[in-house]
Amino acid sequence: MAKKKLPSVSFVVFGAFLISGCASLNPFIEDLNIISVPQERALSSEMSRSLKTEMKIVGDVTAVNRVNTIGNRLVGALPRKNFDYRFAVVDDPTPNAFTIAGGAIYVHTGLLKMTSDEELAGVLAHEIGHAYERHPTKGITRAYGAKFLETLVLNPNEQNKVKTLALQMVQQSVLNKYTRSDEREADEIAFYLLKRANMPAGGLLSFFQKLQSLQGKQPAFLAFLNTHPPTSERIAHIEELMRSETPSTVLN
Ligand SMILES: [Zn+2]
């Protein structure tokens, strides 16, 4: 991993740095999280606030209720609740969903349009998986560097910088920079979480199959797929889990 002299660099420069990211790191660095759970909760509130100014949050009762009903049923099946999980709908035709720090999950209207309830449950379970394993703050640690974050989060005088950081992460979709193993883990959690919630895991599979059939036809999908392992690999992984009936090692 390249050495970063982060504390002296301005936030603007971080932007360029983040986009390049770190593609492959050793497992220890990859899994490092300098942000504590209470800090993640505080960051989550800031990010949710920033997000409201950057994106159009939808108030449509039918859409919001649909997401909340399915999402809350899944959250209820988690073995422990490390965060106050919450869901919101964003007015955006791109079929996407994303998670910010601290269990806040957002679903685009474009995704709601193309999914059945079972498929939506699959996507939400995947995003809950990211939140549960704290992939967003692990991603932030990778992107910004542990040293920089340490000085930032431990210093009470740096609260304005935390706000700037929150806004910047929202604007640059830093949180979507997950590693391949994060994605695999989130898929695995999704599979077992659906089971625990007595919901069919087939929705996750059919969502991936839908993505696969649309891949290449709709450019909007490419950005989403590029941040994930290839769909065929994910389909094979889910099919393997369905066949094996191995007890969960991820949701204990
Ligand atoms: Zn993901």
Image (cartoon, rainbow, N blue to C red):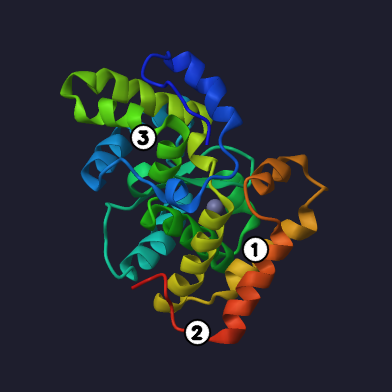
Depth check, mark 1 against mark 3: the one in front is: 3
Amino acid under label 3?
Answer: Ala
Cα distance in 3D space between marks 1 and 3: 36 Å
Instruction: Tell me, yes or no, if residue 84 can be seen here.
Output: yes
Q: Earlier in the sequence, mark 3 or mark 2?
A: 3
Instruction: Look at 71% across and 45% down and name the residue there.
Output: 221
- SS assignment at label 3: helix
Give residue 246's mark.
2
Amino acid under label 2?
Answer: Thr
Q: Earlier in the sequence, mark 2 or mark 1?
A: 1
Where residue 69 sits in the image (x, y, percent)? 39, 62
Cα distance in 3D space between marks 2 and 1: 22 Å
Q: Quick one: 112 or 192, which is closer to the camera?
A: 192
Give residue 70's mark.
none
Where residue 234 sits in the image (x, y, percent)? 65, 64
Instruction: Look at 78% across and 52% down and name the residue there.
Output: 215
Instruction: Look at 63% across and 78% down and name the residue there.
Output: 240
Q: Circles 3 and 2: CB distance less than 8 Å?
A: no
Q: Earlier in the sequence, mark 1 or mark 3?
A: 3
Amino acid under label 1?
Answer: Phe
Q: Describe residue 3's horizontal placement relative to residue 19 as left or right.
A: left
Give residue 146's mark.
3
Q: Quadrant of the C terminus?
A: bottom left
- SS assignment at label 1: helix
Instruction: Look at 44% across and 45% down and name the residue there.
Output: 29
Q: Quick one: 2 or 148, which is closer to the camera?
A: 2
**Pointer 1 residue:** 207
